[in-house]
Image (tube, rainbow, N blue to C red):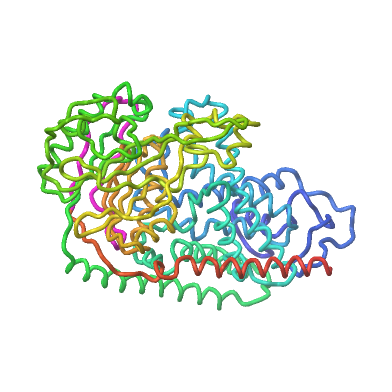
Amino acid sequence: MSGMRAGAGGKLFHLLLMTTPPGDGPGAAGVRTDNGSPAGSGDENQPRTPWTRRFLWGFCIPVLAGLLTAAAHPLVLPFLSEKEILPGGELSLFAWIGLVPLLVLARGQGFWPVFRAGWYFGWAYFGLSLYWIHYAMFMFGHIPWIPSLLILILLVVYCALYIAFPVAIAERMRALFGWPLYWTLPWLWLLAEHIRHYAIGGFPWAMLGYTQFRDLWLVQTADLAGPYGITFLLAAANAVLTHVWLRLRGLKEPRNPWTALGVLVLVTAAGHVYGYLRMAQKDELMNRAPGYKVAVLQGNISQEVKNQSGRFRERILEIYNEMTRKADSLGADVLVWPEAAFPLPAPQDISSFRGTGLYGGELNVDLANQNDPHPKRLKTKKMILGVPTYFRMEEFEDGKPKSTVRLRNTALLLDDSLEVKGRYHKSHLVPFGEYVPGGAILTKYFGIQKLVQAVAFFVPGDSMEPFDLEGQKTGILICYEGIFPEISREQANNGATILTNMSNDGWYGLSSGPYQHMGMYVFRAVETARPMVRAANTGISTFIDANGRIGPRTSLKNESTTWQEGEILFQEIKPLRITTFYMATGDAFLYFANVVAILQILWWAARRKTK
């Protein structure tokens, strides 16, 4: 620093980078220097780091870094604007550098100081990414404001663990073995993401790789390794840039970071070149493929009304029937209603929608006993209808048989005379929204079932068979299922040439949620090389082609208006029948990364015991 001139901000940041971490001080237990030896020179009389610097280093900077990284995802701040901030994706750059301040400041610290800093980073990252969950619980789950906020905090604190652990372990490996962060952090990061993917029902929302959904050349690599390849690249980029920064600041690195930087640049460039060539290849295939015309119906029914759909069934049917009449005249091959758009639950084995009030039939509230011998026929040959279905399940309670009604979130395929020709039941339910993980224990002893309406009554389906659309097949993804790449991959491997997502983004309100949700479907389309049809009750309905291009789409509506005009999207899509590498190999790269990470952790644990 001698002889250098810098502004006050630069001096402060330089001091932060070069000084001992706050809260520990020289000689503190568990703190090691860059070569892995205990910190401190034996002078126990050195003053402790001022609490202001400890607070700035240990909390403020990790939180700021977490907020900047979260801003790489689509961001809506309702108190500023109801529109997405910088919708062109300019903020996605933060995903490449957002972890650098955290990793720089973690240099040479003990496991727990780094863990805490990574945890605070995660609080900010997931807090900004998931704030809309509080809105959903408070406004539509009818959970009081404070309990819903506490649930959100609990979720954020839990998800933050999946950042704290890989960062802390990677830094300790660097200190103990001299391994650069780019040798360890990307593998550990993917292991943590994989665990989050399945733990407690699975919640892989806000994965780092999803920030790049607008970079279509790079996104094409998802047909090789799914979203995990891009997540790995981003974690590696942050680690490499950390070592470059430290080298520029004069710290001696165990290995020359410039080689790693060169490899990073080459790999990133290669990914973009692959994407450019792959997009051109698929564009040529789509130009030769026959078109398939799809009409999507978005009723814009507010969630508050949907929660009382039985009360407003006639009005809801009037809105959707009017849109169906208009869409039916467009010459579409299939009409798509959103998730649970039909306002009455139907028996699981219902065989016809005559007499249900659908498209001109007389409304008979008892859907198990329809009687309409002269239904109005559709011009369109197929209709996909989102409807809750029910069945009776025989259970035992206190040793006595008991008949219980159970619900399913269902998509039905209807022909032009409203006969049911196919059924798909949602297979991956929303934890704590449609079921309670470990429900018997949590419901009985903690009363979790009471937190969300109708919770613990939904039962998942077990079939992944696509709907036959006469010449094409479509795999169904009902709302939450679309964030799990293995489900769309299985649908495509089962013969689907189109993917159809039926959703209800009304839960999210005017927030980041609907935009984040839509961005994940860019990956689902690219991973399988299948066009994606999105039908949302409110939210963002759209078409995404096999290259991930987002086509015409609806806009978010203000939920304060109870009844709004419905919207129809009409598009000719180009289905493909090719098999991508990701379809053939699945998550092979992810499992390989897990093996590498586990071996690293075992080696680290074994070496720690010998010290």
The magenta-colored residue range is 545-571
The residue shown at (60%, 53%) is 162
In this view, 46 is above or below 286: above
Choose between 506 and 25: the one closer to the eye.
506
The residue shown at (24%, 61%) is 575
Residue 301: percent from left, percent from top: 30, 31
Secondary structure mainly formed by the magenta segment: loop
Residue 217: percent from left, percent from top: 35, 66
Quarter of the image for residue 425 reads top left
Choose between 554 and 570: the one closer to the eye.
570
Choose between 547 and 444: the one closer to the eye.
444
Residue 94: percent from left, percent from top: 48, 55
In this view, 302 is above or below 274: above
Q: Is residue 326 left or right of residue 178?
A: left
Number of marks in picture: 0
The residue shown at (81%, 62%) is 39
Choose between 423 and 430: the one closer to the eye.
423
View extreme (top): residue: 311
Q: Is residue 398 left or right of residue 27?
A: left
Q: Quadrant of the N terminus?
A: bottom right
Residue 134: percent from left, percent from top: 50, 34
In this view, 185 is above or below 453: below
